[in-house]
Image (spheres, helix red, strand yellow):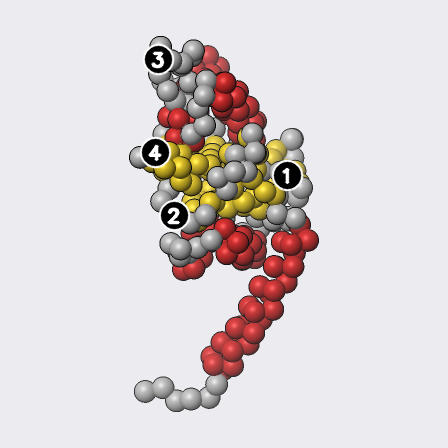
């Protein structure tokens, strides 16, 4: 269980996650120090929700293809997602993240159940989702780009923000209320911290410290935990003031109607 979110900004992107993870090892196990965001070549950030083993396998293979992309002169998130056919100018076809994830789905959700259960129609659903943020070229201009990739290999480009994981419903509600098309990365950092902090109050499967990564055209920056904690404290102070005002309003004696 998890919560990962991405916010597209006018000067880059922000991706954030909680650090609590839960899994079965004969009995339920919970960890609160799981790093859920992976940086590739200081330019692209990937996070996953679902079956950890499949997430790790997918990210490892995507990283291999990304390194191949760089060797072939590509540096474009869209190509990493969709892939690129071999051309005379390039040495090798790039198998995009869509292809990689669809192959994992085919092996573990289709072929493996067929082998185990002895039926050609047997299937399983080992769910996992990825979120990938970086920069792509649009009409020759490099702009922030954000995708969700589903377990069957289908990718969905996001126009403003995205969430995956068990806390998504709470996060979507808050982001819809407070996201602005002109938001900057510094503003989005505060919004991401607020969103995950509030989701932690409602979803017992979201917890631990909050990890934040800022992505710009030049590099990625991991936001220091002391900065995150200071912003959390500032947000809590403002929320306490707002809640007091609302409580006073709701409990005021005033006849209605």
Could you tell whether 198 is left or right of 230 in the image? left
Specify which label sits upstream in the sequence, 4 or 1: 1
* Secondary structure state at the residue bearing disc 1: loop
Say the numbered circle drawn on residue 160. Answer: 2
Quadrant hosting residue 79: top left
CA neighbours of label 4 inside 10 A, class few (<14), some (14 to 19), many (20+): few
Residue at coordinates 49% horizontally, 76% vertically from top-left?
246
- Contact flag, marks 1 and 3 (Cβ < 8 Å): no
Q: x%, y% of residue 137?
A: 37, 34
Q: Which residue is mark 4?
A: 140
Mark 2 → mark 3, Cα distance in angstroms: 33 Å
256 over 68 or under it: above or below = below
Q: Is residue 236 visible?
A: yes
Mark 4 → mark 3, Cα distance in angstroms: 20 Å
- Contact flag, marks 4 and 1 (Cβ < 8 Å): no
Specify which label sits upstream in the sequence, 1 or 2: 1
CA neighbours of label 2 inside 10 A, class few (<14), some (14 to 19), many (20+): some
* Secondary structure state at the residue bearing disc 2: loop
Nearer the observer: mark 2 or 3; the answer is 3
Quarter the C terminus occupies: bottom left
Nearer the observer: mark 1 or 3; the answer is 3
């Amino acid at each position: 269980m998890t919560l990962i979110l991405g916010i597209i900004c006018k000067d880059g992107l922000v991706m954030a996650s909680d650090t609590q993870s839960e899994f079965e090892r004969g009995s339920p196990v919970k960890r609160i120090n799981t790093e859920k965001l992976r940086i590739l070549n200081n330019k692209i950030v990937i996070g996953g929700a679902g079956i950890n083993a499949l997430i790790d396998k997918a990210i490892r293979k995507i990283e291999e293809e990304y390194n191949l992309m760089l060797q072939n002169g590509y540096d474009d998130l869209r190509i990493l997602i969709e892939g690129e056919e071999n051309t005379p100018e390039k040495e090798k076809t790039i198998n995009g993240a869509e292809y990689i994830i669809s192959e994992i789905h085919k092996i573990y959700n289709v072929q493996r159940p067929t082998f185990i259960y002895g039926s050609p129609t047997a299937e399983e659903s080992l769910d996992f989702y990825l979120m990938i943020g970086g920069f792509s070229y649009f009409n020759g201009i490099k702009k922030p780009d954000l995708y969700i990739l589903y377990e069957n290999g289908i990718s969905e480009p996001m126009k403003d923000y995205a969430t995956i994981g068990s806390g998504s419903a709470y996060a979507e509600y808050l982001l819809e209320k407070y996201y602005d098309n002109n938001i900057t990365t510094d503003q989005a950092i505060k919004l991401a911290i607020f969103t995950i902090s509030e989701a932690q109050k409602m979803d017992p499967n979201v917890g631990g410290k909050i990890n934040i990564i800022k992505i710009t055209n030049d590099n990625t920056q991991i936001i220091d935990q002391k900065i995150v904690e200071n912003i959390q404290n500032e947000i809590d102070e403002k929320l306490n003031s707002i809640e007091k005002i609302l409580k006073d309003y709701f409990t005021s004696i005033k006849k209605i109607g």
